[in-house]
Image (cartoon, helix red, strand yellow):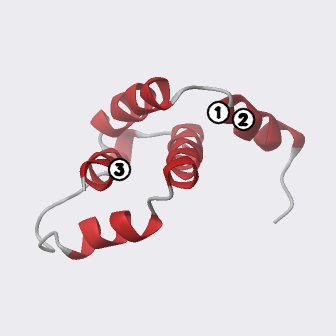
Amino acid sequence: MTRSAAHQKLVDHTANKSTPVLLAALKVIDEKPRAEKTQEERLVAATISDAITERHDLDAKIEAAFMDTPLDVHLSYYEAIIRAMAA
């Protein structure tokens, strides 16, 4: 995937932050209703989620968290990451 210079800067900046800082930022973004999030906020949330998932090798655990959650329950990426880290 080819990234723009701005997107690459965001990825690099995110990679330099500690997991607790990234989790705090993701929690703030996830508290806002999806319909009210800007495209930029969604991109930042996805970038943060990717960084944490890669850093802690959480892919399988996050998938399990979503699979174990009933369809009528909304699970944010922040909540899924917290569950995966606790598993």
Query: What residue is shown at x 24% (from left), y 76% (from top)?
Result: 67
Q: Position of residue 20 (x, y in %)?
A: 42, 26
Q: Nearer the viewer, mark 2 or mark 1?
A: 1
Circles 2, 1 touching at the beta carbon (< 8 Å): yes
Query: What residue is shown at x 25% (from left), y 48% (from top)?
Result: 86
Q: Position of residue 85 (x, y in %)?
A: 32, 49
List the residue tagged with mark 1. 14
Q: Position of residue 78 (x, y in %)?
A: 34, 44
Residue at disc 1, secondary structure? helix
Query: What residue is shown at x 32% (from left), y 35% (from top)?
Result: 32
Q: Position of residue 6 (x, y in %)?
A: 82, 37
Q: Quadrant of the C terminus?
A: bottom left
Q: Quadrant of the N terminus?
A: bottom right
The residue closer to the viewer here, 45 or 63, is 63
Q: Is residue 49 left or right of residue 14?
A: left
**Callout 1 amino acid:** Thr
List the residue tagged with mark 3. 81
Cα distance, mark 2 to mark 1?
6 Å
Report crowding for label 3: few under 14, some 14 to 19, many 20 or more residues within 10 A (C-alpha): many
Q: Tell which circle, 2 or 3, labels the residue nearer the N-terminal end.
A: 2
Q: Tell which circle, 3 or 1, labels the residue nearer the N-terminal end.
A: 1
**Callout 2 amino acid:** Leu
